[in-house]
Amino acid sequence: MIDDDATEDSAEAENLDADANPRKKRRKPAKVNPRKLENAALYYLQRFSTSSENLRRVLMRRVYRSAHHHDTDPDEGSEWVDTVVAKMQTLGFVNDRLFAEGRVRSLLARGTPLRGIRMRLREKGVPPEIIDEVLALVEEDDGDVDFAAAIALAKRRRLGPFSTRGDRLERREKDMAALARAGFGYGVVCRVIDAETPDDLDAMKNDGGGDGGLGYFPDEF
């Protein structure tokens, strides 16, 4: 099962239908009924981990297309969608808390700061109380979460101490800007980019984030 924003959003944009492929002849969208909506939900959930609200949005797009092309009742379709989503929750195929936990871990590993994670979860329709609970637990377990996420992004992008180039001083501002654009605060950016080695970053992370830098650029402090 895929847990990826870009891939999921791309598939949603295509409505998971062949008729959305511009290289194929467009077909008239199917007329929805409870069985077709349930089948659509199951097919979607085979491919993606998602929230109950986001699943509802996906199914409602089918309802609106059906209403447009077949003059079906969107209010009735909305009731069918609610029933399908509730059934998926009862079966355990949709669980907002598990989805949030998995998405948080995935985004942190990719180097997304907490405020970016909160925004992504809101976009997927995760209830605010679940977002707060999951992020609080992550912070309790992992300490300085943004610092760890910034390290992950720096490693992926080969910034600061992860650079394989020999011009760190010349690239310092660019490296700092890259982390800042990702949403990290100035203090976190400095601690990561100015660390001397990856091992020093690991030591800082284990000590709770360090105290503001290891002096790779001593004249700056």
Image (cartoon, helix red, strand yellow):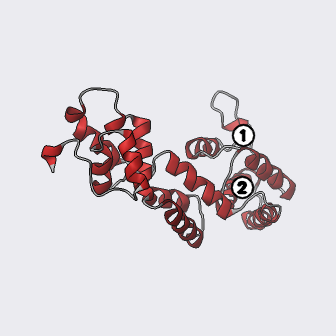
Give whichever of 86, 136 is nearer the camera: 136
Q: How many C-alpha atoms fall within 10 Å of the one at disc 1: few (<14), some, or many (≥20)?
A: few
Give the residue at x 55% y 55%: 104
Look at the numbered disc 2 and give the secondary structure of its residue.
helix
Give the residue at x 49% y 64%: 139
Q: In which quadrant will I find the N terminus? A: top right
- Give residue 39's position: percent from left, percent from top: 83, 50
Q: Is residue 160 above or below residue 138?
A: above
Give whichever of 54, 216 is nearer the camera: 216
- Give residue 112's position: percent from left, percent from top: 46, 50
Image disc number at residue 123: none
Q: Is residue 66 left or right of residue 57?
A: right
Residue 59 position by quadrant: bottom right
Give whichever of 65, 133 is nearer the camera: 133
Residue 14 position by quadrant: top right
- Give residue 42's position: percent from left, percent from top: 80, 50
Residue 27 in view of the camera: yes
Residue 146 position by quadrant: bottom left
Give whichever of 67, 150 is nearer the camera: 150
Give the residue at x 53% y 70%: 132
Mark 2 → mark 1, Cα distance in angstroms: 12 Å
Look at the numbered disc 1 and give the secondary structure of its residue.
loop
Image disc number at residue 59: 2
Q: Is residue 42 above or below residue 16?
A: below
- Outermost right residue: 35
- Give residue 92's position: percent from left, percent from top: 79, 60
Residue 159 in view of the camera: no
Q: Which residue is mark 1?
A: 17
Q: Amino acid at mark 2?
A: Leu
